[in-house]
Amino acid sequence: MLKDRTLVESGTLTDEVESLLDPAEPEGVFHDARECAAKTLLLGALLASPPTPRPKKTETR
């Protein structure tokens, strides 16, 4: 059956398979694994850091 296909049909089929394997990301939103990892590490560092020290209250009598 594959021998019956013409070069144009097999090229179209190849394009369809490639588009299914590597779909375009919707609405121009691109995800970069390194960027996501960096943001995750930054967020983790901010959440794990100790809170800022509060000034001590002075008592006046």
Image: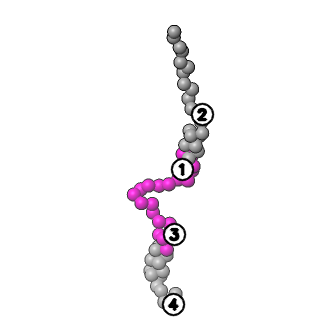
- Disc with the residue nearer the chain's start (1 vs 3): 3
Q: Which of marks 2 and 3 is nearer the N terminus?
A: 3
Q: Do the residues labelled 4 and 2 touch (CB within 8 Å)?
A: no
Contact, mark 1 vs mark 3 (Cβ under 8 Å): no
In what element is the residue under mark 4? loop
Can you tell which of label 4 and label 1 is closer to the viewer?
A: 1
Name the mark on residue 21: 3
Q: Which element carries disc 1, helix, strand or loop?
A: helix
Q: Is residue 28 above or below residue 5?
A: above
* Marks 3 and 4, how far apart at CA: 23 Å
Looking at the rendered image, the disc whose residue lies closer to the viewer, 2 or 3, is 2
Label 3 amino acid?
Leu
Quarter of the rendering containing residue 27: bottom left
Identify the residue position indicated by label 1 in the image. 36
What kind of residue is marked 1? Cys
Is residue 18 depicted above or below 45 in this figure?
Answer: below
